[in-house]
Image (tube, grey):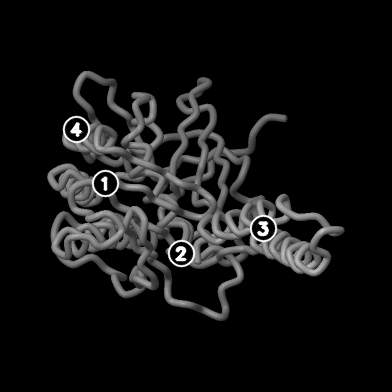
Amino acid sequence: MLKKLRLDGLRADLAAVDALLATRSEAEDPVGWLQFSIRREEIEEEIRAAQAAEEFLASVGLFFGGRPVLGSKGIRADFAGLVVAQFQDLVSKRLATLESGPLAARGPVPLREKAQLMITDVARGSFGFLLEEEPSSDAWTNTPLQIVVEEMSELIYRLSLPEDEIFESVSEALDERLLLSVRRFFQLLDDAGATLRIVQGEKSLPMGADAIHLARSRSEALQIVQREDEKIEGVLFLLPSTRRFELHGVAGGDEVVKGAVSLECLETLAGAEGAQVADVVGQRWRVQVRVREVQQRNRKPQVNYTLTGLLARLGTTQA
């Protein structure tokens, strides 16, 4: 179960026990007071354990309201099937991009099996589904699928926020095929008159009908332009764990270019005989970057960079 849902349930149980304890005293009802006091301690211990528990596998809750939902009784089957499949498509495309590089304009999406989520529970109230990664006994750190599910949940939510500046924070994850899936996701919700709440980890990300309509409009106004690869020079810094890079002093000035590191580039560095992080980081390099421009009407384009290769070492930096 998602940590937030587990904690919400335990806190509701604790509030109920506290309410019962408030109606009695140890002197008036010693047996009942003792039973509820013991239960209160048990719940508090369960809450502490739940808060400390680490979640390495992907899990997300999608909760729906609006026209497709009939109270707590059910949800339209055609809508439910389509929207869950569309969320899965988002996750599959993003994982494939991170694991195997940019997707072709057409054709099958690689690694679909690795990206599969399972429906493991149905939640009532505002009707929803719990999607989880297949259990694995050897997961001791966040799996790639867990990272992608969190990233896509945040991307969906941020597109629905009223602040225009949020555009820049989501643009880096988008490519042409992922943007198409994002558009379809919001079109499906908007056309159906649905609301959405995403629960991921300990976060709850609510989106009302107006927010979903705004996200649809934003996604439909976006355009991805793939520019020619560029060769640039600067002092290179790498964060392999998050696949990020920064290039300082570009063009001999104060400009800093930052972005993602392609999987191929990381594998080349990892496979280079005798390569050490110290041999690369903090050195001046000529590198090759893939350049993508995300455009939105009446806004300055957002330029995103992906490091695809190290071409030549140019020397060390000055102390």
Label 4 neighbour load within 10 Å: few <14, some 14-19, many 20+: some
Precedes in sequence: disc 3 or disc 1 = 3
Residue 302, by quadrant, is top left
Residue 175: mark in rendering: 1
Residue at 18% in and 67% down = 108
Label 3: which secondary element: helix
Q: Is residue 228 visible?
A: yes
Residue 58: mark in rendering: 2
Would residue 318 be found to the left or right of residue 168 on screen?
Answer: right
Label 2: which secondary element: loop
Precedes in sequence: disc 4 or disc 1 = 1
Precedes in sequence: disc 3 or disc 2 = 3
Q: Inspect the image, locate mark 1, and give the three-letter code of the amino acid beneath it.
A: Asp
Percent across and percent down for residue 54 are: 62, 63
The CA span between labels 3 and 4 is 47 Å
Query: Where 196 sits versus 31, above or below?
Result: above
The CA span between labels 2 and 1 is 22 Å
Q: Inspect the image, locate mark 2, and give the three-letter code of the amino acid beneath it.
A: Ala
Label 3 neighbour load within 10 Å: few <14, some 14-19, many 20+: some
The CA span between labels 3 and 1 is 51 Å
Label 2 neighbour load within 10 Å: few <14, some 14-19, many 20+: many
Q: Which residue is label 4 attached to?
A: 217
Residue at 44% in and 53% down = 199
Residue at 68% in and 65% down = 46
Q: Inspect the image, locate mark 4, and give the three-letter code of the amino acid beneath it.
A: Ser
Percent across and percent down for residue 38 are: 78, 67
Q: Nearer the viewer, mark 3 or mark 4?
A: 3
Q: Nearer the viewer, mark 2 or mark 1?
A: 2
Percent across and percent down for residue 44 are: 72, 59
The CA span between labels 4 and 1 is 17 Å
Q: Inspect the image, locate mark 3, and give the three-letter code of the amino acid beneath it.
A: Val
Q: Nearer the viewer, mark 3 or mark 1?
A: 3
